Image (cartoon, rainbow, N blue to C red):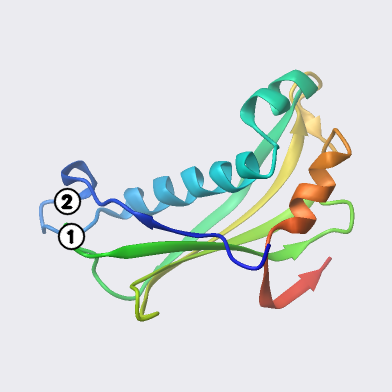
């Protein structure tokens, strides 16, 4: 997979009193897109629940470049910026941009996988999880941790 991009639909409820997208909506779109990319590759929420593992966040940051308004046509693209060889820890980067490629915001999230029974960090299971993580596009400055 070389690109995972989709157009997002800005809802009235995503706006703040200044009539631009509220800061927390950016994070919501990023979280939704991460789950969609995993699910598209077969690593669904159901698989994670059955295998007792799931993603956790250590740090999430958004750099806001341009205001997003209700009628803007905005796309979100997802890539991996950093990852351990076993995919146990990673950084995922989301770019929010228009059709011309103008960057509106960049979200970066550092995370890992957790065993949901032991409540401890873990290498993702089943083995297909590593295959899925490796299939996600990488940033141009990707770093193998």
Q: Is residue 126 above or below residue 9?
A: above
Residue 120 position in % (x across, y down): 80, 31
The N terminus, quarter of image: bottom right
Image position of 52 (left or right of 96): right
Front-lying residue, 130 or 4: 4
Q: Which residue is mark 1?
A: 20
Q: Check whether the beta carbons of the residues at disc 1 and disc 2 lie within 8 A of each other.
A: yes
Image position, residue 3 (x, y; %): 59, 66
Q: Residues within 10 Å of mark 2 (few under 14, many from 20)?
A: some
Q: Give SS at disc 2.
A: loop
Front residue (pair 76, 30): 76
- Any part of residue 136 in sight: yes
Q: Is residue 8 left or right of residue 34?
A: left
**In this figure, what is the number of numbered marks?**
2
Q: Residue at x 75, y 34 (%)?
A: 114
**Residue sitting at 25 percent across and 52 percent down?**
10
Q: Can you tell which quarter of the image residue 113 is in?
A: top right
State the residue at coordinates (21%, 65%).
72
Q: For residue 123, say whether it is visible.
A: no
Image position, residue 59 (x, y; %): 58, 53
Please tell me which residue lies in front, 60 or 82: 82
Q: How far across and down, in percent of the image, does residue 45 sit?
A: 63, 28
In the picture, which quadrant includes the C terminus?
bottom right
Q: Secondary structure at mark 1?
A: loop
The label number, if any, that marks residue 113 in the structure image? none
Say which mark, if any, is on residue 16. Answer: 2
Marks 1/2: CA distance?
Answer: 6 Å
54 above or below 32?
A: above
Q: Mark 1 Cα within 10 Å, few/some/many (few <14, many 20+)?
A: some
């Amino acid at each position: 997979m070389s690109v995972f991009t989709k157009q997002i639909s800005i809802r009235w409820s995503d706006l703040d009193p200044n009539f631009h997208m509220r800061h927390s909506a950016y994070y919501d779109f990023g979280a939704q897109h991460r789950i969609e990319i995993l699910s598209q590759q077969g690593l669904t929420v159901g698989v994670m629940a059955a295998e007792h593992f799931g993603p956790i966040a250590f740090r999430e940051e958004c750099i806001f470049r341009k205001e997003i308004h209700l009628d803007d046509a905005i796309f979100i693209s997802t890539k991996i910026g950093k990852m351990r060889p076993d995919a146990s820890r990673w950084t995922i980067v989301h770019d929010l941009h228009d059709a011309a490629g103008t960057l509106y915001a960049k979200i970066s999230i550092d995370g890992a996988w957790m065993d949901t029974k032991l409540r401890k960090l873990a290498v993702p299971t089943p083995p297909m999880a590593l295959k899925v993580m490796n299939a996600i596009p990488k940033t141009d400055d990707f770093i193998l941790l």
